[in-house]
Image (cartoon, coloured by chain):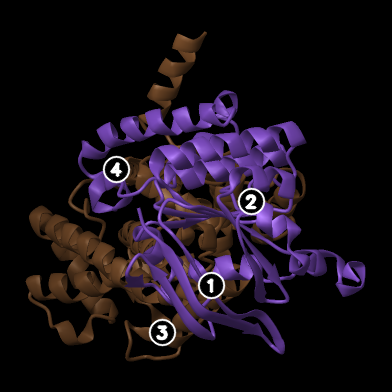
Chain colours: A purple, B brown
Amino acid sequence: MQSLELKNLSKRFGGIKAVDNVSFKVEAGQFVGLIGPNGSGKSTIFNVVAGSFPPDGGKVLLGDRDITGASSDVSFKRGLVRSFQIPRLFFGMSVLENVLAAARSQRGERMTGTVGRVWRDQERELAERALELLEFLNLGHVARNRASDLSGGQMKLLELARSLMANPTVLLLDEPAAGVVPTLAHEIFERLVAYQRDHNLTLVVIEHRLEVLFGAADRVLVMNNGRLVADGEPGAVAKDPAVKEAYFGSEAVV
Amino acid sequence: MPWTEILVAFVTFCAIYYILAISLNLEYGFTGIPNFGKVLFYAAGAYTSAVVTGHLLTRLAGGSGADVCTARSAALRETFAAQEPLAIMGVFLLALVASALVGALLGGLLSLPSLRVRDVYLGLLLLVAAEIGRVFVRSTPGIICGSHGMGGIPNPFSWVSPAGTRYLVYALLCVLVALLCYWLVQRVVHTPWGRVLKMVRDDEEAAQALGKNPAKVKIQVMMLGSSLAAVAGSLYAFYSQFVGTEDFVPFLTFLVLSMVILGGQANNLGAIFGVLVMTAIDRFTRGSIFSMLGIDLPFDVSYARYVVTGLVLALLVMYRPQGLFPERPLRTPAWEVWRRRAKSRA
């Protein structure tokens, strides 16, 4: 269980302020939705928080620890895991291997650790868990297929399975249900909520399907032009005029 | 019996090239490091063996270490090796180990560019590094006998006669070393460590986001791969009994690359097929072989090698980029679990 806090975070790309002085705190065990129109800075926040690139200003705190500018493998070791908007699978590997790849502290991942036989028992345990996760996400039947042979929706699910296999304390999901059929999108979110409650996971989800997200999240943050424009319970945020303005422009409100 | 000689030479080269092929497969096929400078590490092994043999064996034979490049010094080593089995075999083993170490060090050093540069740029960088190394040695008389090369690197079985038996024994030794290298690589690769290599190959950034350290595994892979290539180079030096810069041209790297691509990326068993085919093309397009067999060709056959190798590479990339034997999942105990669960569900 860890909280995630952003303090005055900023990130510029050339003259564009992709993220402009954003501050918020996600409490441990909270399910937060992050929404906003395309280009409002949602994915950039993920990229900066997870260490894909450093911020131009501000701080990122994981629990009490300052992880500002830490590289992504370091943040991962502290419990922070992120998924990518466009699935970034290991396409030359099988589905099961993709999930196993995300497991933490594998003995056999060290070159010297491959010498003994100790890693083999751990590998069997990890495989049990990985296969359970795959079945949980309806991917059990394709475990031996190459990741590149999956459909777009299945790739999204595999990316989710991989994120969960990493046993995160804080998880950032970038559009986990994009490109999957509507019924499956609802199912993914139901399973996600069940998993989040069971594991007391701190969860931040970017999602464009508001009807799916609003039913699942405890709290919704709204971004527009790099700034945070609304923050509250889903019901309240849905009525907020600033949110309508973000999506439809100011003329629509008047 | 020219055919026996030709066959023994073919087996020796297959074994040596197979070590090079699994070394390149480890770097390129598994980890995605396009080491187009492969020949540099092969040369490093050959030259390390030449230096060790030149200095150590000459002194053991009672000569001076100052003029190892001369024909007299070479003859002294050859005569001595034919009479002293223990000395030459000891020197051979020492040279083999020294080559492996030098290869690992050089590989570690040249893995540093791979931390900053990727893909084709990295490939070109390593290709050029290998050529610079070769041209530098060739044009500097003071270094490892310069452009003249160094002879008198006796076969470790010099004391075995007749020569036919000697080369047969040496061929078997090369096959044994190749099998050992295969066993070693399979053992470290069909593990979670091997999985990290493939992660780095497929998506370095995603691998890092999942807590892996791509820089670390790249250094490890280049050290192991270069060490293997240097072992192959050492075996080559003791086979040809001579090292010279003309043996280490970039063509050899691409010959090995075509073996890897033909056999199949990240498939060390498939590479055996690639090695057999490409070594056959390489060995049997030589004028000397045809004259041994009493065949008089109206053209210079040795250039056919370049044409055929280029053609094989081009056709493969166009029609079967995954190779003849495609990549398969790593064999870890995970699949036992998968099979058991699949069975209990059915």
Q: Are marks 1 and 2 in contact (CB under 8 Å)?
A: no
- Residue plotted at (46% across, 77% down): B113
Q: Amino acid at mark 3?
A: Val
Quadrant, the N terminus of chain B: top left
From the top left corner, tell me how far across and down residue B160 is, in percent: 20, 46
Image quadrant where residue B52 sits: bottom left
- Report the mark closest to the observer, 1 or 3: 1
Tell me, yes or no, whether dots 1 and 2 are on the same chain: yes
Compute the Cα span from label 3 to label 2: 48 Å
Point out the tag, 3 or 4, that comes first from the N-terminus: 3
| Residue B291 in view (yes/no) | no
Horizontal side, residue B20 vs residue B230: left or right = right
Residue nearest the viewer, comparing A202 with B312: A202
Q: Chain of mark 4?
A: B
Compute the Cα span from label 3 to label 4: 31 Å
Residue corresponding to mark 2: A87
Residue nearest the viewer, comparing B122 with B7: B122
Residue corresponding to mark 1: A48
Residue corresponding to mark 3: B137
Q: Amino acid at mark 1?
A: Val
Q: Chain of mark 2?
A: A
Q: Amino acid at mark 2?
A: Pro
Query: How many callouts does the rendering have?
Result: 4
From the top left corner, tell me how far across and down residue A5 is, in percent: 45, 69
Residue nearest the viewer, comparing B269 with B191: B191
Tell me, yes or no, whether dots 3 and 2 are on the same chain: no
Compute the Cα span from label 2 to label 4: 39 Å
Horizontal side, residue B95 vs residue B233: left or right = left
Q: Secondary structure at mark 4?
A: helix
Q: Amino acid at mark 4?
A: Leu
Horizontal side, residue B346 vs residue B285: left or right = left
- Residue plotted at (80% across, 64% down): A244
